[in-house]
Image (cartoon, coloured by chain):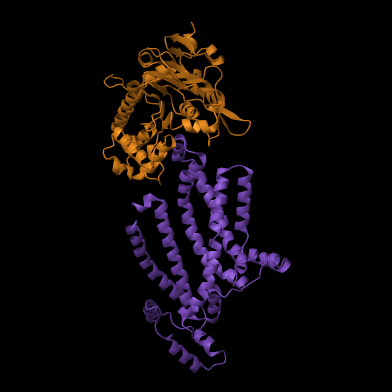
Chain colours: A purple, B orange
Amino acid sequence: MGRYVARRLLETIPLMVIISIVVFMFIHLIPGDPAKTLAGVEAPLEEVEAIREELGLNDPLIVQYVNWVKDALKGDLGRSFKSDLPVTELIWSRFQFTIQLVFAGLIWAPFVGIFIGVMCAIKRGTFVDLGGMLFAICGLSAPGFWLGLMGIQFFSVKMGLLPSGGLGTLKHLILPSMVMGTGIMATLARYSRSSMLETLREDYVRTARAKGQREQIVMFRHAFMNSLIQVVTILGLQIGGLLSGSVLTETIFSIPGMGRLLTDSIAYRDYPTIQGILLMFALQYVLINLIVDVLYGVINPKIRYD
Amino acid sequence: MAKEVLLEVKDLRTEFFSSKKSSVTAVADVSFDINKGEILGLVGESGCGKSVTSLSIMQLLKDTPGKITNGQIILDGVDLVKAPAEEIRKIRGGKMSMIFQEPMSALNPSMRIDKQMIETIRLHSDMTKEQALAHAAEMLKKVGIPDPPRVLKNYPHQLSGGMSQRVMIAMAMSNDPKLLIADEPTTALDVTIQAQILDLMKKIQKEENSSILLITHDLGVVAEMCSRVIVMYAGKIVEEAPVEVLFGNPSHPYTQGLIASVPKLGSGVKVLPSIPGSVPDLASMPEGCRFAPRCKYATDKCRTMNPDLFQIGENHRCRCWLMDK
């Protein structure tokens, strides 16, 4: 198991290198000039040129990239063009809000989704199944922003039960958590249903019954535990989506998280901040996938012993 | 010595439902006994209902569209068709256990062998985990696994097919079952491993004086293992006889065809005889004798009237109008 984790860790290194290149190059593909934005529309050309020189924007891209990576490895992501604050500080101050949102979604959605899916599979063809899948399809088809707006309209404006934006108390988290989690819940419900149906047809489930095991234990220990292998893979992909999904949720609920910082920075062509945030997103994605891989090894001995 | 009946199957009918109203009959009016300490063979082509018969006996039709619609299955005085689920559960894996065709997929891939064996043992006894583990090791030794402690710590994917089937047999035999149902236990294995597994089953059966219902399409396996044979065709028993009688004097044209189509070394036959046609579709059974469309002796009577299972000798029954004398 230790070797398996170590190997997965090593594998993330080349991945991070590629990601850093892509992140860096993409920014420079966006049209617009940060020096111009900084100097103002009216500023004379010489002034713009001076700012450009000062920010190092006149260096060849490869030099800029190497400098950036060198600093990044030392934990320095540069200073924001806009606020002149260190990017790491800026990201950290916003990250705590985003992570709250992500957790608020993750704390219920996977469990509810898997539960619905498994129940639907066990009660296949009944009204439970029909109801569960109808619910899942609704959850899948409803866009997050629409759910959020409807939630605000209903729970905040009409009933006055929940705050319509900001963070601070648990109450503030309820609506955003709903927006963050619904998609994951619905997707996992559908995947765990089909995965469970597949495992229920497996020979070893029949073996478990043939040895006289109780039906609930046959379902849980023999069918469900094996059906999780597929579900965990999907979960990893979904959590990645959750991070980028936070951009929308933050905008709807006016939460000053990483997503908001990103949209603002893009508007301002704040290269160091954009790069820093994208790198953070990528790092989180890689980290989550690493965790999923390890989890995968825990539930699937075939992978662990390869 | 009087033969004691262990399992009695009476007029078993199992139907598969595609909807509430429409169904096909996979097993029709099947009746037979298994005596204590006997190996009974159940032979037939794929789709003849032999596996469905075994799953019916084990009451394992749940999660299939199949349902027993008539008949009794009496094991040691208990009618399994009518018994409550909880009672069936206690019998399965205890008094009656089963091994399957694909040993590799019949073991739970995410559980170690020790856990799976301990689970089986503890379901039917009061042993502690340690006692159950010791018993599991003992069982593995009995089935000829050289290093039980190592195999116990393995996951199924680390074992070969032959090893897996040995583990399955050890698991199935761990609670001293009176009846072992073996559904094509060697079909998925190499020929050399086949012989080993068959020898092993025979040895354990003798030691424990248990009974085996051996389901197979391989007449060679039947000849080696069984004392009595039932031949099934299209969901019905067509012939039942002691093994020597069946091979020496096959009476049903289908049995004759089956035996003739087994290759014999040195017989000089260039072209192997085969039975023309194929097994009828369950949904559109021929009227009259189900084998009539493929039978070279078929008469008009065969094509219109269903023959009974005629008693034609001691322990010898045959479902054919030719035997109606």
Q: Position of residue B184 (x, y in %)?
A: 39, 30
Q: Give the quadrant of residue B313.
A: top left
Q: Give the quadrant of residue B105.
A: top left
Considering only vertical position in the picture, is A209 above or below A175? above
Considering only vertical position in the picture, is B205 above or below B305? below
Considering only vertical position in the picture, is B154 above or below A79? above
Kindly identify the residue that appears in the image at 48 percent across and 83 percent down. Answer: A80
Question: In this orientation, which residue lies closer to the viewer: A129 or A263?
Answer: A129
Q: Position of residue A206 (x, y in %)?
A: 46, 37
Taking the view exactly as shown, the residue that stands out farthest to the right is: A158
Q: Position of residue B308 (x, y in %)?
A: 52, 13
Q: Position of residue B31 (x, y in %)?
A: 49, 19
Would you say residue B116 is visible in this rendering?
yes
Disc tally is 0
Considering only vertical position in the picture, is A39 above or below A306? below
Taking the view exactly as shown, the residue that stands out farthest to the top is: B325
Task: Look at the image and tell me in which quarter the N terminus of chain B lies.
Answer: top left
Would you say residue B188 is visible in this rendering?
no
Kindly identify the residue that appears in the image at 31 percent across and 42 percent down. Answer: B151
